[in-house]
């Protein structure tokens, strides 16, 4: 991923972004066409201070038929995004752009034994169920034994040891206060997909500059 110096974010921000989003695109290069799949995931800090990603894919997924322990993979995790019209800047000679945040993680995959599938799925569901509190937490115990076992056999759990992180938050940080103010107003008036979230993020950039 090309990262403009004005938009680059550090690893601490990237890890927080990964944990907050918890959903991304897992991609793998093969001898034929590249393969990818969308996956929820967990971020785990290990005893040595390094991080790894935990996820699973359906056993019937074409990516699962290609991935092997030790192969290199890419995980892309994006945040909100929105189109920015040059008319919103309030200054001349501007061009259209797109505001977004994204983290690219590369590392080597490790296929986990089937015996770890239950622990992995429970950890994954617990992470996202707790975000729904005070709703009672859903657990695997709510599935009958035969269905649970069939489901666990139908997935492959994967760990990715993070080796490199590229992260950026492209929110017109290189522009001035007038441009920021105009874009925030334009995004809030437009109300397109992601517009409100991006407006909030740009407002935070503007507040930091104050």
Image (tube, grey):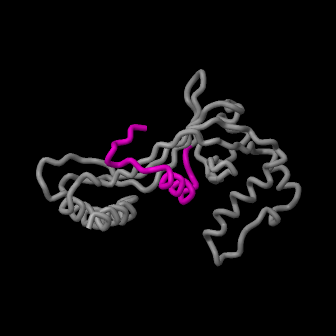
Q: Position of residue 61 (x, y in %)?
A: 68, 38
In the picture provided, is 8 more to the left or to the right than 42?
A: left
The residue closer to the viewer here, 71 or 65, is: 71
Q: Quadrant of the N terminus?
A: top left
Residue 114 is left or right of residue 21, and the answer is: right
Q: Residue at x 30, y 68 (%)?
A: 207
Q: Is residue 126 left or right of residue 18?
A: right
Image x and y of residue 108, in percent: 64, 35
In screen coordinates, is 141 left or right of 89? right
Most distant residue in the top direction? 31
Determine if the magenta segment contains residue 84.
Answer: no
Provide the residue span drawn in magenta.
1-25
Quarter of the view holding residue 181: bottom left
Residue 178 appears in the picture as rendered: yes
* Residue at the image position 25 percent from the left and 66 percent from the top: 185
Q: Is residue 156 above or below residue 205?
A: above
- Toward the left, the furthest residue is 92
Q: Residue at x 48, y 55 (%)?
A: 13
Q: Is residue 22 magenta?
A: yes
Q: Quadrant of residue 122?
A: bottom right
Question: Looking at the image, which is closer to me, 128 or 164?
Answer: 164
Q: Quadrant of the C terminus?
A: bottom left
Residue situated furthest front in the rendering? 48
Residue at 52% over, 44% down: 76
Q: Residue 47: image x %, image y %?
A: 69, 51
Camera sees residue 190: no
Q: Is residue 192 above or below residue 9?
A: below
Give the x, y percent position of residue 138: 73, 68
């Amino acid at each position: 991923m090309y990262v403009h110096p004005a938009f680059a974010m550090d690893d601490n921000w990237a890890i927080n972004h990964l944990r907050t989003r918890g959903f991304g695109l897992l991609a793998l290069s093969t001898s034929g066409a590249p393969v990818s799949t969308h996956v929820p995931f967990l971020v785990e800090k290990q005893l040595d201070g390094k991080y790894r990603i935990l996820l699973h894919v359906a056993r019937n997924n074409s990516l699962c038929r290609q991935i092997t322990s030790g192969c290199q993979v890419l995980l892309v995790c994006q945040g909100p995004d929105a189109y920015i019209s040059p008319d919103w800047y309030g200054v001349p000679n501007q061009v259209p752009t797109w505001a977004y945040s994204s983290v690219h993680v590369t590392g080597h995959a490790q296929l986990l034994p089937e015996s770890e599938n239950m622990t992995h799925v429970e950890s994954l569901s617990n992470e996202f169920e707790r975000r729904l509190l005070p709703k009672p937490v859903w657990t695997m115990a709510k599935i009958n034994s035969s269905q649970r076992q069939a489901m666990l056999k139908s997935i492959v759990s994967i760990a990715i040891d993070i080796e490199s992180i590229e992260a950026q938050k492209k929110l017109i940080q290189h522009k001035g206060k007038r441009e920021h103010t105009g874009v925030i107003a334009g995004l809030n008036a437009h109300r397109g997909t992601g517009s409100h979230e991006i407006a909030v993020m740009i407002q935070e950039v503007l507040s930091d500059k104050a």
